Amino acid sequence: MSGYSITRISRYHYAVGPALLLVLAALIALPGFADKATLRLATEMAGYMALAIMWNLLAGYAGVMSIGQQAFVGAGGYAIFMLAGSAGLPLIPSVVAAGVIAAALAIPVGYILFRLNGAYFAIGSWVIAEIFLLITAQSDRLGAGSGLSFPTAVAKTFGKSDERAALFWWIALAVAVVAIATAYLWLRSSRGLALTAMRDDESAAAGLGVDVVRNKFAVFLLAAAIAGMVGAVLFLGKLRISPTSAYDINEWTASIIFIVVIGGIGRLEGAIIGTLVFFGLRSYLADFGSYYLMALGVIAIVMMLKMPKGLWGFVYDRTGIEIFPMRRNIVRSGEGRP
Amino acid sequence: MTALLETRNLDAFYGDFQALYGVDVKLEEGQCVALIGPNGAGKTTLLRSLVGWVPVARETVLLNGQPIGGMGPDKIVSLGIASVPEGRRLFPSLTVDENLLMGTESGRAGPWTLDKVMEVFPALRDRRRHRGSDLSGGQQQMVAIGRALMSNPKVVLFDELSLGLAPTIVNDIARALPLMRDNGISIVLVEQDVRRALAMSDYAYCILEGRINLQGVSADLAFEDIEKAFFGAEA
Amino acid sequence: MTELINSLAQGVLIGGLYALFAAGLSLVFGIMRVVNLAHGDLIVTGSFMTFATVSMLGLPLWLAVLIVLPMMGLLGYVLQRGLLNHTIGTDVLPPLLVTFGISIILQNGLLQIFTADNRKLDFGAIEVMSLQMGPVAMGWYAILVFAVAVATIYGLQFLSYRTRLGRVLRATTDDPEVARVMGVRTDHVFGIAMAIALVICGIAAILFAAWTSFTPLSGPSRLLIAFEVVVIGGIGSIWGTLAGGITLGVAQALGGYLDPAWQTLAGHIVFVIILALRPAGILGGRR
């Protein structure tokens, strides 16, 4: 009788790794053949995708429903304006620092929020984001209600307008890659298994010795760090920040939720496909203003009710394709996938 | 003659897991039937199928010959099948009287009133304004039974009547069963305590791994046969 | 000093309005275990309904009340049976996401119909009349709002503890599964509960429409107030919503007394402090 082993890899997955590298190479080379407007759009997409990956990790895997991620996006945005702008510190360390600052803020925030349950956590996180907004709007150093402009002199040190666009794109791409990689590695680790166990049955996971709250907290901090870096790079691109744009729930949370719901909650690939769909819809329909937003609301509700696993879940259930393999196959040794 | 309540070739599932395989049981008018078997054998699933908590095919549960399988629990109780769930499950924030009155939500007419329940369980008399959560286990069980009676049922399903209660208290409660039968109520009993189940019932079914593997008139069933049935035929 | 006392009195009175914002949210959470993220937008929808009937159609206020409240109740029942009942289950995500979607639809729908202009109802002379008690002056309209709030909450209490519907609602709150086995049509009861919640929202909406100006985007801040009141006052406690409302109203009044810009912030901060100091007490140990 032959032995069995557990593997995540099925045959076609040997092709996935090289294909991903190829895509990544093409994305890095993007400034070579894309114009400034395209780069800006791509930068925005990378930022949204990173936020969506993290929100998916929070809600889809850890069962943490936050609708206050704009707190950390805004904090990161303001951090970069203070660090790289006012203080003139080097750009890339400043972006990383923005992430660290956001995560540091997430510690006391999490300490309070994790006392709240499910749905109450959601609104509590929103209250926290409102507090961030109101305090920022009271702070003269942060430009109070009218906000800050990035100092032109400092912006010029990043190069000419199209060089800047390329630089910001690479940073945003790096943040997105870091988000996907950490989420993927996290989910494949023993902590990831714990996360999935938590999602499926919290009390059972606790019974198995999984520290539920600590695991959730860790994901929350990671998500805050990524959100801070995304805020940093996206507001760098805008060169302006104000309290209402920095802590905008529609921009930084509602859109992200839409992306995750459309793409598929609980699937890393869902965030990617959701981002593409969202930006596709936006480019064609955004001119319709309120009607466009109402349509997004309707689509999200219909998806939630009729296709709760999202587009990628729909594809996965029919084909079994995964870009980031999570499922474990039991394979008889000496044979491939049966 | 059609039975009052019967299952025909009943299959039941929890998701992908099949809990019952082709179960046939019968309850005649005025009878008390016991379902016995080890933990996880499918007794409670069978009861939950009758209550409407587990979805099953329409034709597999019949009340007076009419198919009722898979109907909602609210519909089933309105047809006269009441239940005393495992663990009593009183409404903790309601008083004893309010708990009992919830039985009237079945919308069925009949003889049962608060006063009549108090006659059956005098121990509840001075507890009527207490909350369900303030009562002892035995008193809670009395309220749970009273609540079922208030729906004026034809059949009452008992899930683990004696679980977690002292034997003397169980005896007190069990006295209600003959009284219920005098009032024309038939009974299905799920019970861990095999001797007690046989003593209280007319007919018994033994369930193992989702199948009936022994049945007979309670008085005729030998305890050894049941022990054998519990551990499977080949043991 | 007089100014401080005046603003505190104002804080207590607006607490009544806040309690009305919160009562429906609390009721719905208690029974369906659903936090309705569209709650604030539903209140604002009620305000716009009132605005439309009074200011646009020119109907008298009493008629507007008779139109708006039943319409809100109907809206609640239909919303619950038609949509929200399909989201109830063990997972908290679907109801949150669906109500979030409703929130966005309502906001943008109202924007489309009523534009982003500030609106306010005019209730006439009562808005400027005040009751002078020694040095303290309290607006008659604020007193009216508070009285309506107390009466509404008393009514809710009466309904819950003195009627058959209330008994069924509380039983369903305790254990919906067993309630169904007793013959309760829980789908219908959920619809009724949402209808009651939205009638209370409607009462709040009418009072709110004359209290201050509002826009289609005023909903989220009403939701946050309602939520904070529920958590401060204790989940599931009917009179707790009034206590929570007054606490929040006074906190805001104190903040606003120190610096007008701090009014809203002070409310949020008091909420966070209470949450940090009394986590289990407020949530009743549910985790």
Image (cartoon, helix red, strand yellow):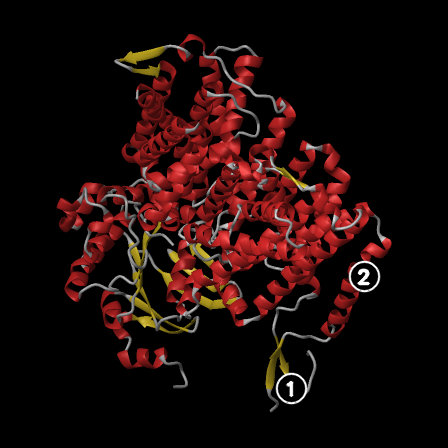
Quadrant where the C terminus of chain B sits is: bottom left
Q: Amino acid at mark 1?
A: Ser
C71 left or right of B139? Answer: right
Res A319 → quadrant: bottom right
- Which of the two residues, A49 or A32, is positioned nearer the viewer here? A32
Amino acid beneath label 2: Ala
Q: Where residue C197 appears, x then y in whole percent?
A: 43, 33
Res B87 visible: yes
Q: Nearer the viewer, residue C42 or C83?
A: C42
**Relative height, residue C30 to residue A335 (above, below):** above
Residue A26: image tag? 2
Which of the labelled discs sits on residue B212, or is there none?
none
Q: CA distance from mark 1 to mark 2?
A: 37 Å
Residue at the disc numbered 1: A333
Q: Residue at x 57, y 33 (%)?
A: A145
Quarter containing the N terminus of chain B: bottom left
- Residue at 70%, 46% (x, y): give it: A154
Evaluate if marks 1 and 2 touch, with contact meaning CB atoms under 8 Å apart.
no
The picture places residue C55, in percent across and down from the top left corner, at: 55, 13
What is the crowding at mark 1: few (fewer than 14 residues within 10 Å), some, or many (at least 20)? few
Q: How many labels were placed on the picture?
A: 2
The answer for which chain carries disc 2 is A
| SS of the residue under disc 2 | helix
Asked if residue B93 is positioned above or below residue C42 in the image, the reply reads below
Q: Nearer the viewer, residue B93 or B116?
A: B93
Helix, strand or loop at label 1? It is: loop
Q: Is residue A278 left or right of residue C20?
A: right
Mark closer to the observer (1, 2): 2
